[in-house]
């Protein structure tokens, strides 16, 4: 089974990576392909001040899942909703829940209680698992995603008994389940690869992986130059050239650098992950999030035998 098939056959995918690498786009594309494969899929965005789903799907996501395509719902798991959902498990009367949450002292305590935010948001995601085959989570950037998943470990140490301990243990069970995967999105850039490797190591040490993690190398430049062409380019680059010829050689040298950056990143990531990264080249789409996601879904779909025609909206 290839990496994409492995991810899509599981139950949970946490999508993370350095800021701006393509986490949201990949989370959405994975969810689209999962839905096309016939799995009842939920895509979650998490506690964000910049909701991104409206630019990808026709409508914005809400706390209660919104259906965007056949088999595909999207939820914005925000703090206010997660908190209300949590309090409601203890106080089933809605009016009273409102009263508790509007109480300034209680609210202040909950807003600042260490770890409460992470715990309640994760709890909500895990509760939604009951209604779906596959839940894809557009997590925060790596460091923050690490702390969010690690909070359950700290909570399990902090609370010796009671409902919080029980909840932390339930979350830990899901996090460490073999059907729960982490997908990292990286770029062929040294800093991005460094951060990815650091996070993988920390998460591995903290036992925050269930199934083996997978890495996508986004905006990868696939090899096109052979060794002879590369030598020729280097020779031309050292020579006196006319202005036009110099422009041309520069473009070639730039292409060669991108290819080498991809090669180096592939090798470093491959060693750390124990598998070759899934390479995804830059796609068209003119920077329009919806089109970029559609094209990524086509690229990922190809890896699991889902054709463009079978995707809900491309
Ligand atoms: N392979 C690709 N080809 C072309 N454009 C891409 C590709 N991957 C992502 N993009 C574009 O790059 C931008 C950043 O992607 P995205 O928003 O998914 O990243 P992110 O990691 O979620 O960012 P943030 O850390 O801000 O949440 C978006 O405009 C997206 O459409
Ligand atoms: Mg994002």
Image (spheres, helix red, strand yellow):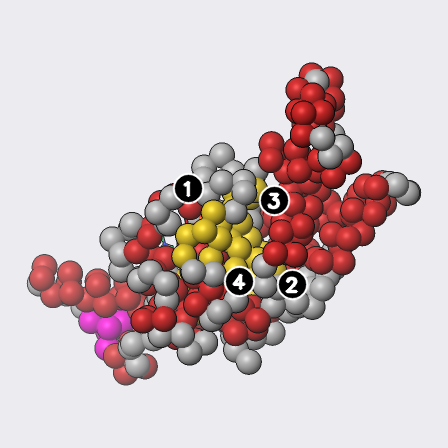
Magenta region's main secondary structure?
Answer: helix
The C terminus lies in quadrant: bottom left
Q: Pick out the residue farthest to the right.
A: 160
Q: Which residue is mark 4?
A: 40
* Separation of residues labelled 1 and 4 (CA atoms): 19 Å
* Separation of residues labelled 2 and 4 (CA atoms): 16 Å
Q: Nearer the viewer, residue 279 or 180?
A: 180
Disc number placed over residue 180 in the picture, else none: 2
Q: Quadrant of residue 209?
A: bottom right
Q: Is residue 196 visible?
A: no
Residue plotted at (57% across, 71% down): 9
Q: Which residue is mark 1?
A: 60
Residue at disc 2, secondary structure: strand
Residue at disc 1, secondary structure: loop
Q: Is residue 178 visible?
A: yes
Q: Are marks 2 and 1 in contact (CB under 8 Å)?
A: no
Q: Nearer the viewer, mark 1 or mark 4?
A: 4
* Separation of residues labelled 4 and 3 (CA atoms): 28 Å
Q: Nearer the viewer, residue 165 or 60?
A: 60
**Mark 4 vs mark 3: which is more N-terminal?**
4
**Does the Cβ of the disc 1 residue fall within 8 Å of ligand 2?**
no
Residue 48, image x, y percentages: 52, 38
Residue 86 placement, left or right of 310: right
Residue at disc 4, secondary structure: loop
**Mark 2 vs mark 4: which is more N-terminal?**
4
Disc number placed over residue 144 in the picture, else none: 3
Residue 89, image x, y percentages: 74, 39
Q: Pick out the residue farthest to the top.
A: 104
């Amino acid at each position: 089974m290839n990496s994409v098939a492995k991810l899509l056959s599981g139950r949970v995918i946490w999508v993370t990576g350095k800021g701006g690498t393509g986490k949201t786009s990949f989370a959405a594309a994975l969810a689209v392909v999962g839905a096309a494969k016939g799995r009842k899929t939920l895509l979650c965005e998490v506690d964000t001040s910049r909701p991104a789903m409206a630019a990808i799907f026709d409508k914005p996501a809400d706390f209660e899942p919104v259906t965007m395509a056949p088999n595909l719902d999207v939820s914005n798991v925000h703090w206010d909703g997660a908190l209300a959902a949590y309090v409601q498990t203890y106080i089933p009367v809605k009016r009273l829940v409102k009263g508790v949450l509007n109480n300034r002292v209680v609210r202040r305590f909950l807003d600042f209680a260490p770890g409460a935010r992470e715990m309640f948001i994760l709890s909500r995601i895990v509760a939604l698992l009951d209604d779906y085959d596959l839940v894809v989570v557009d997590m925060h950037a790596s460091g923050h995603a690490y702390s969010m998943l690690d909070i359950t470990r700290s909570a399990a140490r902090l609370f010796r008994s009671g409902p919080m301990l029980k909840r932390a243990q339930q979350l830990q069970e899901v996090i460490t389940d073999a059907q729960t995967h982490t997908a990292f999105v990286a770029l062929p850039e040294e800093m991005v690869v460094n951060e990815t490797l650091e996070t993988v190591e920390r998460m591995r040490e903290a036992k925050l992986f269930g199934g083996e993690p997978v890495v996508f190398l986004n905006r990868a430049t696939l090899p096109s130059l052979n060794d002879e062409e590369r030598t020729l380019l280097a020779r031309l680059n050292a020579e006196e050239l006319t202005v036009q010829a110099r422009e041309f050689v520069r473009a070639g040298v730039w292409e060669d650098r991108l290819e080498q950056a991809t090669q180096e990143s592939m090798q470093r990531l491959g060693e750390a992950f124990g598998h070759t990264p899934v390479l995804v080249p830059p796609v068209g789409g003119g920077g329009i999030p919806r089109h970029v996601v559609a094209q990524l879904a086509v690229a990922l779909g190809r890896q699991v035998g889902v054709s463009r025609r079978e995707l809900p909206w491309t």
